[in-house]
Every structure is written in C-alpha cells, then in structure tokens.
Image: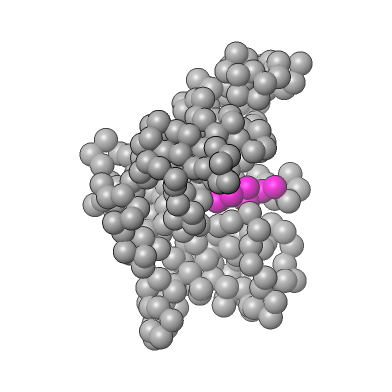
C-alpha cells in the first residue's frame, strides 16, 4: 500500500530543491543551477548529452559529493543538516558502476539495504528479515534468493540492486543509468518496475536516462541539462517538442505521435 506523506516534505510537494548550485573541479564548471525542484511521489528523468551534468546532479542529491557553492535541500533542511544515518533511511542511491558482489547471495545483497537501520554492530532483527523478503517479493526475485549475484543475468542483477534499495525502506530512489547495459526487454522490465514502485508505494524516483523516448514514456517529469545548466524542467508532453529538443541536444529532431499509445516519439532528422 502507498506510504504516508513524508513529514519532511514541503506543503507544495517538493522533496528536493536546489538553489544557486554550482560545482567546480580544478577550475572547470561542471554544474550551475539557479533553482530546481523535484516533486515527491513522481518519476523524474534526468536527460541530456554526455557531460551535461546529469550524474553530477544525482551525486549531489545523494550526498556523494559536495557543491562548490549553493544549497541542496531535502524536505525543509539542507543536506548538511541531515544526520548521515537518518538521511540513508530516507534516500537510496544506485551508482552506474555497482560494487563487486563476488561470493554474495542475492538474499545477502538485498539485506545490505537494512544497514542504515541496524548499523555495523547492530543485530539483524526479524523486522530486517521481513523487509528483505518483502523487497525480493516486490521486485520478483524471491526465487533467486539463494543464487550468487554474479550468476544472474543483467536484468536480474539490476532487480537485485533495486530490491536492496527497497529493503532500505527509503522514500526516494536515485539511480544513475540503471538500464544502460541491458537489452531492450530488460530495459522495459526495469523501468516498469521503477514506475510501479512510484505509483503503488508513493516513492520518489530520480533516474538518469540516455534513451529519450524511454524517458518520455516512463517518467512523470523530465529535467534536461546542457553544459551543466538546467535548460528545461517539464512534463514529457511539454518537453518533447522539436525546438526544445534541438536546444537540449544541439541537433535537429522531429516528433511524431506514438502509434500505439498516448505521447510522442522523437527522432533525429
């Protein structure tokens, strides 16, 4: 059943907000955003060409790196004000390059999501075991629980990592290109799963995607980045227009109605 509204959430539904944000590394400006908001309980896709700042922005939201200037707020507090464990109980992050899992069973990987709740020396409780099993059921990998993670297919492995995020009981999932190494069937499977988690559990999902048409199909909102700047933040219908896409990607693109459903498809002229 859907989660209750997060008590830290702003009255207008904003979960994350960025203000006068910039990231510089060795004098190079990687990100510069005056203001950007992420609404709760929606799937938001970060799109743009390589090097546009998508992964940098996601790492800032996940507290995996710090801004050179400006602020990122989660709920009504800046990220610096959040206790590390308290934040980890609310926000789960999955990097594009996941850590090695040699010798690890699927059940053990998913159980790692419970770490923010019991710590390094805490006891793995019955509640932790129940949350781990529920996460595997929800992501349809319970039948893989006693398999080694390294023996799974790419799609199954991604489901296991997402199950770990679900077991974490976080209200927000941040994922960096979770479908980049998958075939088309598994891409659809993973994006279906993320959208279902958002709709049925009330989770906020922010995901970096390279496939523009997949992003438009599965996301409630799209944030387009270009050279470290946010050039558009809108619904897919508003953003999937030829002039906007040309501004974002720097090439001429056309948009046609999707033949099988509502929405549109974009292609390069």
Instruction: Note whether residue 168 is visible.
Output: yes
Q: Please determine whether, in this image, residue 32 is positioned above or below residue 131.
A: above
Q: Which residue is pictured at 37% across the width and 73% down the height? A: 117
Colour scheme in use = one colour
How far across and how far down the image is residue 103, in percent? 69, 80
Q: In which quarter of the image is the N terminus?
A: bottom left
Q: Which residue is pictured at 75% across the width and 71% down the height? A: 151
Front residue of this view, candidates 195 and 90: 90
Front residue of this view, candidates 79 and 114: 79
* Residue 202 in magenta stretch: no
Front residue of this view, candidates 240 and 71: 71
Q: Which residue is pictured at 49% across the width and 42% down the height? A: 23
- Horizontal arrangement in the rendering, residue 220 relative to residue 122 (left or right): right
How far across and how far down the image is residue 267, in percent? 72, 22
Q: Please determine whether, in this image, residue 86 is positioned above or below residue 209.
A: below
How far across and how far down the image is residue 58, in percent? 51, 47
Image: magenta residue range = 174-180
Q: Please determine whether, in this image, residue 247 is positioned above or below residue 54.
A: above
């Amino acid at each position: 059943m859907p989660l209750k509204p997060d008590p830290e959430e702003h009255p207008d539904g904003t979960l994350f907000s960025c203000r006068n944000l910039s990231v510089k590394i060795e004098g190079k400006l990687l990100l510069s955003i005056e203001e950007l908001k992420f609404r709760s309980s929606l799937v938001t896709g970060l799109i743009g060409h390589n090097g546009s700042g998508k992964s940098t922005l996601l790492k800032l939201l996940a507290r995996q790196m710090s801004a050179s200037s400006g602020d990122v707020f989660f709920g009504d507090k800046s990220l610096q004000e959040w206790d590390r464990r308290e934040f980890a109980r609310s926000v789960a992050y999955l990097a594009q390059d996941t850590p090695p899992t040699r010798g690890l069973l699927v059940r053990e990987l998913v159980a790692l999501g419970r770490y923010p709740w019991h710590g390094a020396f805490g006891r793995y409780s019955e509640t932790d075991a129940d949350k781990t099993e529920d996460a595997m059921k929800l992501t349809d990998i319970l039948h893989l629980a006693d398999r080694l993670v390294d023996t799974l297919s790419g799609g199954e492995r991604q489901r296991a990592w997402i199950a770990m995020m679900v077991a974490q009981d976080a209200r927000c999932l941040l994922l960096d290109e979770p479908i980049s190494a998958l075939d088309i069937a598994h891409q659809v499977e993973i994006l279906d799963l993320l959208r279902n988690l958002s709709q049925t559990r009330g989770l906020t999902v922010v995901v970096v995607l390279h496939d523009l048409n997949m992003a438009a199909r599965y996301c409630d909102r799209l944030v387009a980045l270009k050279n470290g700047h946010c050039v558009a933040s809108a619904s897919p219908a508003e953003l999937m227009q030829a002039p906007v896409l040309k501004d974002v990607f720097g090439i001429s693109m056309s948009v046609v109605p999707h033949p099988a459903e509502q929405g549109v498809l974009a292609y390069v002229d």
